[in-house]
Image (cartoon, coloured by chain):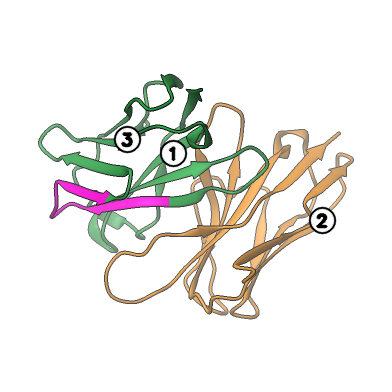
Chain colours: A orange, B green
Amino acid sequence: NAGVTQTPKFRVLKTGQSMTLLCAQDMNHEYMYWYRQDPGMGLRLIHYSVGEGTTAKGEVPDGYNVSRLKKQNFLLGLESAAPSQTSVYFCASKAAGRGNQPQHFGDGTRLSIL
Amino acid sequence: DQQVKQNSPSLSVQEGRISILNCDYTNSMFDYFLWYKKYPAEGPTFLISISSIKDKNEDGRFTVFLNKSAKHLSLHIVPSQPGDSAVYFCAASAPLGYGGSQGNLIFGKGTKLSVKP
């Protein structure tokens, strides 16, 4: 009964380092999303995917790349981390199909860039 | 330009009383509205939703009201419990393809609810 799992939960990086955040869902959902949440802000969409092998830009995509090679996984990459990317990152997934469906979220990755 | 606004950053309520959280939106294309609850160090949890064809949806202690003419929705929690203390996010989406929409959610900044025993 895992739902959406994010790894790692915490990470500290130095400016310029790269890393990949992993999101895995076991609900066979078609849609997956990456958000960031900053203090006093709502969730802002970075990138999303409507199915395996597809990705698209959200509201704040600069400095990030994503890949969806498998339906259950959605990876978020930072090629050269910057202090402005210090944030809490949330992954979400949603079922496709008729009618509206809610998104289901993981517990987040807390990322600090020094 | 914020399309979904939660103008109250915080709200304090006594246990047993009603909590009313408000949300305003500007995009008349929005047709699906959701409320999420978030505890510290956890992800947002889906609470309740409403489609624009309805003006009320109820689930136990939680009721969402939608006033399309005022572009306003509210979440009522009755009775409030200490375990309801969390940040509540309002979110909305437009139908896929309408005005360039990809059907993605737009979130408000959240309202922190504190329920005092």
Which image quarter: residue A39? Answer: top right
Q: Residue furthest left?
A: B69
Q: Circle 3 sits on which residue?
A: B78
Labels 2, 3: one chain: no
Asked whether the residues under the numbered discs 1 and 2 touch, taking CB atoms below 8 Å apart as contact, a structural biologist would say no
Classified by dominant secondary structure, the portion drawn in magenta counts as strand
Is A112 above or below relative to A49? above
Chain of the residue that carries numbered disc 1 in the rendered image? B
Chain of the residue that carries numbered disc 3 in the rendered image? B
Q: Is residue B84 magenta?
A: no
- Quarter of the image with the C terminus of chain A is top right
The residues tagged by marks 1 and 3 sit, at their Cα atoms, a distance apart of 18 Å
Q: Circle 1 sits on which residue?
A: B89
x then y, percent, for residue B10? 46, 21
Q: Residues within 10 Å of mark 2 (few under 14, many from 20)?
A: some
Is A19 above or below relative to A49? above
